[in-house]
Image: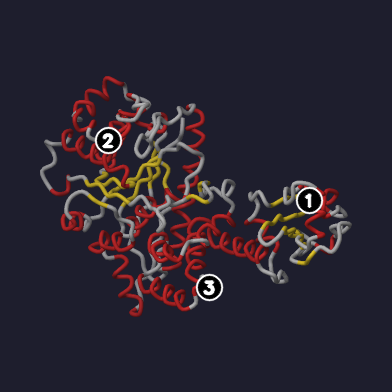
Amino acid sequence: MLRCQQSLRQLRSLARPTTTTAIVLRSLFSTDGLITELGRRGLLADHTGSHASLTSFLRTPRVLYCGVDPTAGSLHVGNLLPLLMLLHFQLKGHQAIALLGGATALIGDPSGRDEERPVQAVEQVQDNASKIEKQLIHFFENARIYAQKRFSHSTPSQRPVKLLNNLVWWRDLTLIQFLRSTGKSVRLSSMLSKESVKTRMTASNGISFAEFSYQLLQAHDFWHLYKHHDCRIQVGGSDQWGNIVAGMDVIVRQGSDTQTSEDEKAYGVTTPLLVTASGQKFGKSAGNAIWLDREKTSVFDFYQFFLRTTDADVENYLNIFTLLEPQEVEDIMLAHKSEPEIRSAQRSLAEEVTEMIHGEAGVTQAQAATNLLFDTELANIRAEDAAEALKYDPRYHALEDIQLLGMPLTKLASLSGLTRSRAEAVRLIEAGGLYLNNVTVSGPDRRLQAEDLLEQRMAILRAGKDKHVVLARK
């Protein structure tokens, strides 16, 4: 079984702000401004209760949680919004809980889906949970460093993020116990009214009893955390609204005898389901998810994903995905609008998000790889940084010297997939369209020599304008 209740290292308290930074930091760390700040950044879709009541509630440090079902072996950029909301709460001094759905992932959430999720083996879910657990620890540790760098003068006293797994309480809970507690607290009419349920019930394949019951499982999680961890707020995407409200209903019914004050209330807060200005779902590149795991999405491709952000979306993303202050975003956009062809706003976005996820080293590596593949001047590129950024990229080929040095470029182009065959590579050379380190290959007999390798490490073969492979020494 998975070991749970691991927590991240305590975030350090820093010095008080200087006079010149006090106004900015007062805005950032003011408890009264949290909900307003989330709304301004575009991180807030909705919340239960009134703005005034929730703002008043948050004047006392609270415990909140966000659940992540390990249905895959990695988080993707679409998962970042609720995690960033947890981060903002934590920066205000609240206690954040990241809940791994080691139990709920065995059933599957029907929210936002047109068909039944495939059933995953228990071992697969546990393996996914183990990987995502490490990613969550990595995310909050990197976010701590990222936030500390930007607000080095002062942060409120922060509590470490708790990492829990709901498998801990579900594995010993019997069906009878569950039905007598949570089952008795939920009305069927309420369950049937949920949008995700109504949509699936009218579909040709319907909805299974297992997925229909998922909202009860999530509701029980909220009740369990409320009862045992003093958790008062659940955070989730806007598609989780029905599940969150179901949890609040259970809390009210189960704890009706004790909820006599404002402090006993529970709240739900949701983030928007982000789409691009053109209406496409955020987080996909050519139909593929952009993963946080560098083995699934290389640091280079992660950086490039944000670098390719459109002008229509970049200001919105700077507010959502970074901790930049409003004036900083305004200054970046002002510079961008004066020279949009330089794409300075997109570069700032790519650097900020890459640093938060992959650290400062990730930014350096991604920039080196970008220069390696797209700049004409290669003299100042650190091959080691570029290799690290491209390590898991399909364009990166690490070969033994015997497979690399002295080999015809036509053969290397074919074996690396740059061309479909050696004959195609020959035709490309004759048309002047094959390049080695940005220099046109003059003839089909050209071979790769040691002196062609940048820093004795790698060389770039390019077909046409933007199709590349990187050939590197192992």
Residue position marked by numbered label 1 in the rendering: 424
Q: CA distance from mark 3 to mark 2?
A: 49 Å
Q: CA distance from mark 1 to mark 3?
A: 35 Å
Q: CA distance from mark 1 to mark 2?
A: 60 Å
Q: Nearer the viewer, residue 253 or 283?
A: 283
The answer to which of marks 1 and 3 sits earlier in the sequence is 3
Above/below status of 218 relative to 273 = above
Above/below status of 239 relative to 16 = above
Q: Residue at x 24, y 23 (%)?
A: 179
Disc ID at residue 219 = 2
Q: Nearer the viewer, residue 3 or 80?
A: 80
Residues under numbered marks 3 and 2 in contact, where contact means CB atoms less than 8 Å apart: no
Kind of residue at badge 3: Glu
Residue 435 horizontal side relative to residue 279, left or right = right
Disc 3, SS: helix
Q: Nearer the viewer, residue 384 or 191?
A: 191
Q: Position of residue 152 (x, y in %)?
A: 42, 69
Residue position marked by numbered label 3 in the rendering: 341
Disc 1, SS: helix
Residue 230 horizontal side relative to residue 407, left or right = left
The answer to which of marks 1 and 2 sits earlier in the sequence is 2
Q: Nearer the viewer, mark 1 or mark 3?
A: 1
